Every structure is written in C-alpha cells, then in structure tokens.
Image (spheres, helix red, strand yellow):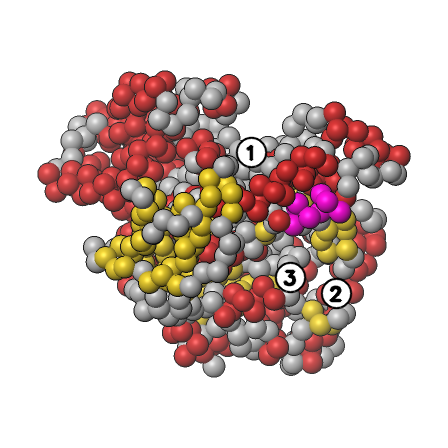
C-alpha cells in the first residue's frame, strides 16, 4: 500500500516520537470508533497497546473512509451520521426468533410509506408503523423523514425479505429470523460424547492415491464409531488451486464454500465401471504411479498426487452419465446456483493463469464484465468439468456421512471452517465486492507467535457483506453443512472482531475491526439449525471475557485445550472446565502430545527463530508447566506417586509416554464438557507437529506430514483395527466418558 504524503509524515513523526503530525488524534479516534476500528487492544501480556495513527488511517482507508487530514476526518464523521439516511432501507435485518425489530424507512419528508414482509413460503405480511419522533433532515438537498415499522415476533425461522414503498419508489432488504439459541447440542447434555480429530490428507489406506480421501474418511468414521466415537473432526476440506502446484495449507483455500477434488476416491466414481479398457488401463497406471507414496512417512507430495488424480478425472468426465445420474448432476448444479458457476469459471481461467497474473486485478476483468462473460462462453467445457468435480465431491461426502451415522455416531463428520480464503483465491475474485481491499487478516503477538501472524486473507467488509444480504456467508455455510453433523469455526472470535493488517505492515502493526456479531452468529446458528448440526467455536487466544458467555447463550460450544487451561500458575482442575465445550489435550498448532511432553515445540521454534527469549528459558518454563500437570495426574491417582517426568519412571519401573497420554485423556474425561476430542496422532504415537505458525513451507513442511507412529513408520487405516496403542487409548477414553 502506497502512503500519501500526510501518512508518510505521520510515519516520519512516529520515528522521532512526535505522533500528532498535525492530525488531531482524538478526532481520528472518534472516527475509528464510529467505524468499529479499535484504537487500542489488550495483548497476551495483559497490557494495553495503542494502535498507531498511520495504522488507523490505513484501516479506515480499506473501509472506504478517507482520513488523511483533520478536514477529511470531520467530513467523514458527518458522512457517517447522514449515510444511513440516504438508504430507504437498511442493507439487511437479522432478528432473533420471538423478538420484534424496528426497521427505519427513509423517505421524502411527509410522504407515506409501506413496509411488506415476504416470507420464504410466499406469505406476505404488512408491517405495522410505529411512532417515530425523529426530526427530518436535509440529505443532499432533499428533506428526508424517517418512518419506523415493526417486524413482529413470531415469524418463522428462515430467510425472508422486506420491501419498502413510497411515492412509487421501492427498496428491498434481506430479513433473517434466526434462533435465539441453537438447540442441536442439547442431545450432548443428556449424554456426553467423544470423537477423533485428524488431518484427513495425512490419513491414508492401502487404497489411497498417496493422500487421505473421502473414502478413507468413511472408513475411519466406521472404525471410530465401532469403538464408541460420536464424530470425526477433519481439517478444512475447502478447495485449493485447480491445478498443481497447490497450496498445502487447508487454512488458506481458494474458496471456503466448495471442496477440494484432491480428496476424491477415483474408484468410488460409478462411471469408472463403464470406461473402455484402454482408458481403464491408463487410470490403473496413474494409480500405480502414486500408490507407492502411501508408504512415504516423511512428506506428502500433493502436486504429484493431484496431477495423477486430475488426469484420471479428466478421463472419467468423458463418460456419458446415465439419465438418472444426469438429472442428479443437473439438480446439484441448480441447487448450487450462480456461486458454483462462478467458482467453476475461476477454476477454468486459473488453469492457464498464475495467481499473480495482472488479469485478476484488471478492473475490466470482473464478474459480469464483457471480457469475463466472453470467457465464460469460450470455457464452457472446462467450466462443466469443474462443476462435475464438485458434484463428485458432494456425492462422496454424502457417503462418508452416511457411513459415520451407520457406525453409530450421533454427529458423524464435523467439518472445519477456515477463517478466510487466500488473497489470490477464487473467493477474493468472485466475491470481490464483499471484501475489504488493501488489508489481510492476522493476529497480534501471543505467547506462541511472539511476532504476530499475517494469514494473507482478505477480511469481509462489514458494510458490504450486509449490503449483499449476507448471501456469501449464507451460501458458504449451507454448502459446508450439507453433509455434516457439525462444524468447527476456526477463530470464531473473527465473527466479533478481526485483526486487520494493512498491506506492507508487519503483523504487529494492525488493528481490530468490529463486526455485527449479532447478525453473523445468528446466521451461523440459522444455517446450523437447518442442517441439524452442532457448532463448535475455536475461542482460544486473546478475547474479551464476555464473548464466551455470549456464545454459550447462543448454543455454540467453545473449545478447551488441556495445556491452555490454567488457574493462575496451576492447571485448572478438570471439573471446572466449561460444560458447553469441546475439550481436548492438544490442537493442530501444537505438537502431538508425545512431542509436547518432550518439548519438541520449544526446540523447533528456537531453531526457526520464533522465540523472543532463549531456548533455555522457554524450555525451563515448559518443564515447570509439565511438572505441575504431572503433579495433578499423580494427585488424581492417574499416575504412580513416584512418577518422574524426566525419565518417565515410577518406582524403578519404566512408564512409557503412551501411559502418560492415556492418563492425560482420563484426566480430561473428568471435565463436564459435553464433547471430548482425541487426536488421531496421539492414538498412534506421532510426534511431529502438522503446522508451525509463523513459518512457510520452505522452512517447515506445514500441512504435509503423513500419519506415522512413534518410530516414524507410516500408519495406514488398514493397520488401525489391530493397532494396540490406538485401541487402548480409544477404549480408555470411551470407558472414562461413559463411566
């Protein structure tokens, strides 16, 4: 982002300690507050940190608010006050069931107004006008008045619409009636549940094409369900790049709405049975080419695997569908609507253009432009291929969820929703109007990422998202939840506020921007209600204390991680954990428990230069924390009284990490939390972390670590049924939870 002369002057003044540079900071802070931009924040250190003026100016600029001088700031404050009066209707209205809502309609002063409510089922209701004593005001030379109408209580849950009319002028707005409290987790209050958490790509079988897939997910769910599990939580399955090379991180997708074809099991596609022998031989050769990768326990090769799968999928796409399957495909496309068409168009264009191609920033190359619409016509065949890929993904996800439910799981597959999509993603292009330009999402410094984080993802623009009637959010959630029993929302605090990092700034130099959490949480609850799915919010990190209470009141579960739950300097007794939460020993951003016990994360972060203290200091603090946790385990009788953390010995008898991991899970099961999570890596002895925040794939193989045991040998799904460690941990957890 290029700084204006005034912005550059502020930067210069900051360097000399003089922060005003002619700009009234109090005035700037008033403007920031009006637009939901935080002027300070409390960090992980418990201290209040002030956001610099230059950062505030940059963030306001991304919101479309110019604030380079006192005159511009004053003008922007006036515009913020008069702006809503320029609208006949608010951009969208979200109201909780059983409550009323006041809707302001702005019309020429003295003119009558009407407001009609159109329900999803076609019913139309007239809204009742209420008393409104607001004085009229001049808006761009037009005397404008305000009429207030009431959205009545008792409207059904769902997506409805509002239509205002006055003097022959009409305006419409989305009306969402959302649950006051999501009830899908009520079944867990009667009987707690537990499940497996895993990175699907890392979990392979003898039938895999070098990477875990949807069929492997079905098999893993069946195995876990047979042992009493209620769910399998997987990493985000969002689509990545349509051709190699592909982004490894499932948390930096090309879209959050659609799925990654790399997870398709080729042999599960019915059309394979009708491929002619020569083409079938080609498919078999492609499988042979990557089949040996199932034994690689060091690093996944997504590019080689995806290239082979795409070649096979291209062959299968040429097979004509039966009449019944053709109708099913057409119905899927109809239900998915223009969003699928636009995503498939992006895929077709992206096949031949790099992410940094100037085309993506060309103002004449936006959706609906003549240039792009001509490309839509020319690329019709490729668009059809990518639509077909999404249909196959949908079918195989449906099969995986069905297998999970047949195994006895109450929830089945629980999806993970990433915070956002990549800056060069399909979402960034197709939904450009709903994102804020010139900034990306991240996180301020914390204990484990002391330099802060920049995730290189564009944030929703709060106003523009509302102006779109929240349609992009609604479509994304309904698609992800289509074949799911639950959803984990990564960094759910982002529905309240997000850390915006202006382009060119370090991750430290950002600011929090507030969102309409009542609307966003309400829409999340509505779509989960419709899908019958449980919602789990990843509410870790720095947050305002009231947020967790609010989420619980709305029926959304929180997240409790054993290593993070402390009361002062001591581990929090498990019986004091939250009831409405998913509790687990670790998370994917930490090493598996075996590695954590050994302090692998301290050594790794030290090697990568991610520490602000010495390795010795970090290790000493980590060991002190472990000693306290082991002390709690001994107090509870879960470890022998003479257990020594340094040598894993008790009374001369060696006690392996496997027993310590089981003890930690038995301790966790003493918590009242309605869901307990067991990481698959803990059940097989894996030590390597899947992701080391603050690094790139060149530094550490983030999201590319295949599942392996304590000896570094690849673990396949086929081995789990007779794997003593896997069966022992799952039996211990099931016994502890049910007992």
Query: Is 458 above or below relative to 582?
Result: above
Q: CA distance from mark 2 to mark 3?
A: 25 Å
Local SS, label 1: loop
Give the mark nearer the N terminus: 2 vs 1. 1
Q: Is residue 29 visible?
A: yes
Q: Nearer the viewer, residue 709 or 74?
A: 74
The residue wearing badge 1 is 437
The residue wearing badge 2 is 625
The residue wearing badge 3 is 544
Question: Where's residue 303, x and y in %?
Answer: 46, 30
Which stretch did the figure color magenta?
26-33
Q: Nearer the viewer, residue 232 or 129?
A: 129
In reply to whether residue 640 is colored magenta, the answer given is no
Q: Residues within 10 Å of mark 3 (few under 14, many from 20)?
A: few
Give the mark nearer the N terminus: 2 vs 3. 3
Image quadrant of residue 15? top right
For the point 49% across and 50% down, which residue is it? 136
Q: Which mark is residue 494?
A: none
For the point 36% across and 33% down, which residue is it? 343
Question: Where's residue 204, x and y in %?
Answer: 42, 46
Q: Residues within 10 Å of mark 2 (few under 14, many from 20)?
A: some
Q: CA distance from mark 2 to mark 1?
A: 42 Å
Question: Where's residue 634, x and y in %?
Answer: 69, 77
């Amino acid at each position: 982002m290029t700084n204006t002369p005034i912005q550059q002057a502020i930067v210069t003044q900051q360097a000399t300690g003089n922060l005003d540079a002619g700009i009234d900071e109090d005035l700037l802070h008033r403007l920031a507050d009006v637009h939901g931009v935080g002027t300070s924040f409390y960090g992980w250190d418990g201290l209040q940190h002030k956001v610099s003026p230059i950062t505030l100016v940059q963030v306001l600029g991304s919101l479309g608010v110019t604030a380079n001088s006192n005159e511009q700031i004053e003008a922007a404050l006036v515009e913020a006050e008069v702006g809503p009066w320029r609208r006949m209707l608010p951009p969208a209205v979200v109201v909780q069931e059983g409550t009323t809502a006041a809707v302001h309609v702005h019309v020429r002063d003295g003119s009558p107004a009407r407001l009609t409510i159109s329900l999803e089922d076609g019913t139309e209701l007239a809204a009742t006008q209420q008393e409104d004593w607001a004085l009229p005001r001049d808006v761009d030379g037009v005397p404008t008045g305000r009429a207030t109408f009431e959205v009545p209580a008792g409207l059904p849950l769902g997506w409805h619409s509002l239509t205002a009319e006055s003097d022959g002028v009409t305006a419409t707005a989305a009306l969402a009636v959302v649950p006051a409290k999501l009830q899908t987790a009520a079944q867990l209050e009667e009987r707690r549940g537990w499940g497996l958490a895993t990175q699907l790509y890392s979990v392979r079988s003898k039938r895999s094409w070098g990477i875990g897939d949807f069929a492997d997910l079905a098999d893993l769910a069946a195995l876990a369900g047979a042992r009493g599990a209620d769910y399998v939580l997987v990493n985000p399955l969002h689509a990545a790049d349509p051709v190699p090379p592909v982004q490894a991180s499932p948390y930096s997708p090309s879209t959050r709405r659609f799925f990654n074809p790399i997870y398709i099991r080729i042999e599960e596609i019915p059309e394979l049975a009708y491929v002619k022998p020569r083409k079938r031989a080609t498919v078999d050769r492609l499988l042979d080419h990557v089949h040996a990768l199932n034994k690689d326990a060091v690093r996944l090769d997504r590019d080689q695997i995806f290239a082979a799968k795409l070649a096979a999928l291209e062959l299968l796409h040429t097979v004509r569908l039966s009449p019944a399957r053709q109708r099913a495909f057409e119905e899927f496309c109809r239900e998915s609507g223009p969003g699928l068409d636009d995503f498939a168009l992006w895929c077709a264009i992206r096949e031949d253009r790099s992410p940094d191609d100037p085309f993506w920033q060309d103002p004449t190359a936006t959706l609906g432009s003549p240039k792009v619409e001509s490309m839509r016509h020319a690329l019709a065949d490729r668009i059809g291929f990518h639509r077909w890929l999404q249909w196959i993904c949908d079918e195989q996800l449906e099969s995986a969820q069905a297998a999970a439910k047949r195994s006895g799981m109450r929830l089945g597959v629980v999806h993970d929703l990433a915070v956002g999509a990549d800056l060069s993603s399909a979402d960034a292009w197709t939904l450009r109007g709903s994102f804020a330009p010139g900034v990306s999402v991240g996180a301020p410094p914390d204990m484990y990422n002391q330099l802060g984080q920049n995730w290189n993802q564009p944030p929703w623009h709060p106003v523009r998202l509302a102006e779109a009637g929240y349609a992009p959010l609604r479509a994304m959630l309904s698609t992800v939840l289509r074949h799911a029993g639950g959803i984990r929302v990564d960094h759910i605090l982002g529905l309240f506020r997000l850390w915006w990092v202006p382009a060119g700034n370090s991750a430290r130099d950002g600011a929090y921007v507030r969102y309409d959490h009542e609307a966003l949480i309400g829409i999340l609850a509505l779509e989960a209600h419709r899908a019958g799915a449980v919602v789990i919010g990843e509410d870790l990190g720095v947050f305002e204390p009231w947020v967790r209470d609010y989420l619980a009141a709305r029926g959304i579960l929180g997240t409790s991680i054993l290593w993070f739950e402390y009361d002062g300097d001591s581990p929090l007794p498990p019986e004091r954990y939250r009831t409405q939460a998913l509790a687990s020993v670790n998370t994917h951003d930490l090493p598996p428990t075996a590695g954590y016990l050994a302090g692998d994360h301290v050594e790794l972060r030290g090697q990568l230069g991610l520490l602000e203290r010495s390795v010795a200091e970090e290790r000493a603090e980590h060991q002190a924390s472990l000693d306290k946790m082991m002390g709690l385990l001994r107090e509870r009788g879960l470890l022998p009284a003479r257990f020594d953390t340094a040598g894993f010995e008790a009374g001369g008898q060696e006690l392996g990490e496997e027993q310590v991991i089981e003890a930690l899970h038995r301790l966790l099961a003493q918590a009242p939390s309605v869901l307990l999570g067991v990481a698959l890596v803990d059940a097989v002895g894996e030590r390597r972390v899947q992701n080391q925040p603050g690094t790139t794939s060149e530094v550490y193989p983030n999201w590319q670590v295949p599942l392996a045991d304590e000896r570094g040998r690849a673990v396949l799904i086929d081995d789990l049924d007779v794997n003593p460690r896997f069966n022992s941990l799952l039996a211990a957890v099931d016994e502890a939870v049910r007992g």
